[in-house]
Every structure is written in C-alpha cells, then in structure tokens.
Amino acid sequence: MIKFEEFVLKNGLKVIVHEDPATTMAVVNILYKVGSRDEEVKQTGFAHLFEHFMFEGSVNIPEFDTPLQNAGGENNAFTSNDITNYYNILPANNLETAFWLESDRMLSLAFEDESLSTQKNVVMEEFKEHYINQPYGDVWHKMCALAYKVHPYQWPVIGLNLQHIEQVQMQSAKDFFFKYYRPNNAVLVVGGNVKAQEVKVLAEKWFGEIPSGEKIVRNFPKEPAQNEERILEVKADVPVNALYKAYKMCARMDEDFHASDLLRDILSTGDSSRLYQQLVKEKKLFSSISAYSTETIDAGLLMIEGRLSKDVSMEVAEKAVEEVLAEMVNKKVSEEELTKVKNKIEAFVTFGEVNVLNRVMNLAYFDMLGNLNDVNKEIEKYAAVTSDKLQQAATKIFRKENSNTIRYFSNN
C-alpha cells in the first residue's frame, strides 16, 4: 500500500508526496506528458532528443549534473511513446537542490546552438549504434510501420530516421519545449524521508511562479481495426533467422489489460513458461524466445520474438508458435497455472514497492494515466482475472487477421 498526499499549484503542476521515514534518501521525479506520439510524422525523434537536451543546462544553471553530484545525488531519465520521465535521488537533507535544478530547467532551457548540436550528434550516434549497425536493429522500425498505419505509434521513440534529428532547428526546439514541458503538462512526485508540508513549501517556492502553458488538446487519428494478416520478409547480414509476431492488444487502462498481461506472463515469464518449455526446451526450435507488451496509453502490441535454432525452417518455427497461441484460445488455463502466474505478479509488484524510486515513479505513472488510486489496485485487478477472461482475451488477440509478422532471414 503506497500512501500519498496530493495537491495542485495555481499554474497546474500536480504534486504528489509519499512519506517514508525508513530511508535517509529522497526522490524527486518529474513526469512530462510528452512522448513520441506527440510528434509530427515529418519531424520525429523530438521527445527522445529532449530527454538528452534537458541535461545541457538551463537559463540560470549552466550545467545540470555537477550541483546534484556535489549534493550526493544522481539522476537519469527515459522516454517512451507516451511520457518523458526525469528522476533525482539524493540525501533527504539536500532535497532543495533537486527542486532548484528541476524548476530552473522547467522555467527554460538555455537554448544554445552548441548544446543542441552536441545532443543531436549524441542521439544520431545512438541511432546508428542501436538501430542501423546492430543486427536486427531495424526490427522495431519495421514492426511499428507494419502494425500502425495512421496512429503516431507507427514510428519508434528514437524517430523514423537520422535526417529528422539532423534537421532539428532551434526555433522548432523552443516551440516543442514551451508547448510540452510546462507545469500543467507535468506531474511532480517527491518521496522518501520528506514531509508533505515541507514539499508544499518547496514546490510553491521553486515551481509556483513558472508560467503555465496552453492547454494541450490531443486528437490522434484512431488506428482502424486490423482485418488482414500482415507479413514482411527481410534478408540481412544477421547471425541467425529470427521471427517476430506482434498482435494488436488493448490500451493500458482498458478493462481487458490485466487479462492480456497475464497471457504474456503465461507465455513467456520464466523457464516454466509455455513458449520456453515447448519451443526451446522440448522441441528445440528456438535458441531463445520471449513475449512482451508495449503497455501504451492507446491500443498497444503484444510482441513475440525468437531466434531460430540452426537448420530449423521458418515455416516450422512459425507454425509451432501459432500452435502455442492457439492452445491459449482453444483450452482454458488450469487454475493451478493461473494461480502460479498470479503469485509471480503479486511478488513482482510487492518486491518493486520495496524501492522508493519505484513507488515514486508508479505514483507519477498512474496519475498520468488518469486514476492515481489505481496505483494500489494492481494486485487486486490481476487477482480478479479468471480462466474465462484469459481465454476471451486470447480469442480477441490471437487472430490471424490481427497479426503482424516479420520473418527475418540471415544471409549467412
């Protein structure tokens, strides 16, 4: 059970406080409601670029990391399709340092040409290393384009191509910042050895005078229902053949989400999972195979990916995967197997809450999703999933006409 208090500043900044006197540390986390889905198709990669650019210095603070490190702290950030999240961990008695730093970069970045150029080069090198020069690195680009035809999930977080990042101009960067990195588009969560009243005073002091931004109205094109099987075959210089199958699934806040997520767990969590047991251990068709879901605000994907064993044909491997999925549709999961996977989920959620940073990030995430109180209902929602609901979810998801398949062949 994560306890919290919440309030909103006049400029629209949502503030959440989680007191934990058992630690000497504090976490200051800011979630901005901006991700790659907020970009234009001709100008992608902005949100991820800003994840880097936000560390380049703000209007009053020329360098972000050193003051935090001098206060005994550390920080990091990540970007997704839907959000950008920044967090700072530091001794609680130096809490105000994080407020000073985060508020100044929310007020305004320095917007220097040299800094922007530096971070553009950093991101382009990351693009080359992980998406162009890495074996199978282009899979996610190809799968996004295959699965989505109109929604901005059709490109990955890194962006569609290098040129979009290379061509970013300073005015476009300023426009993006002053639209999305505003108090009314952010959630500030402070947790650890802090007091709610102390946080209120600091929030008002450091964030209260930052101007609110314009209200953001999102009107993304609705992805039409997929009614045909989509297949893409690729040949490249990769070590072995690989198979990728993505099925459209519900959005993160849909009532079907927890059943769909349990499907993924049954298929792929641990050595006792069905995909591993049947296709790696028993039949030895794959050297490795896994499943995961994107868990996006709008309708997402349940992805299965595997590297084929030597001399196994793509046809045999793909048929075997589809047989495992068909079994989920045609036969109810036993109570024993369902209980086992629910216990794993409960242990995972409970263990995750041991860490203050995880608690703080979960508070920010669920507030962004629209229902902060749901942060304490995850175990309950997974527990409520029945074998009937699992079968219904499998029937809805694992349809041939709902599948997107990439057959990745090795030239070797």
Image (cartoon, rainbow, N blue to C red):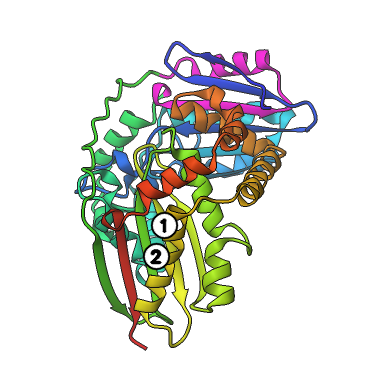
Tell which of 266 and 388 is nearer to you: 388
Instruction: Using the rendered image of the protein, determine whether residue 356 is visible from the camera's viewpoint.
Output: yes
| Left or right, 43 with reference to 298 | left
| Left or right, 62 with reference to 109 | right
Instruction: Using the rendered image of the protein, determine whether residue 136 is visible from the camera's viewpoint.
Output: no
Image point 51% across, 72% down: which residue? 279
Q: Over which residues does the magenta segment extend?
A: 183-210
| Left or right, 162 with reference to 105 | left
Helix, strand or loop at disc 1? strand
Image point 25% across, 54% down: which residue? 164
Tell which of 326 and 88 is nearer to you: 326
Q: Is residue 307 above or below residue 387?
A: below
Residue 81's tag is none
Residue designated by label 1: 303
Tell which of 314 and 203 is nearer to you: 314
Image quarter where the C terminus lies is bottom left
Q: Residues within 10 Å of mark 2 (few under 14, many from 20)?
A: some
Residue 173, image x and y in percent? Answer: 30, 40
Residue designated by label 2: 322
**Are circles 1 and 2 on residues that touch, CB within 8 Å?**
no
* Label 1, label 2: how far apart the Cα atoms are: 13 Å
Q: Which mark's residue is nearer the viewer, 1 or 2? A: 2
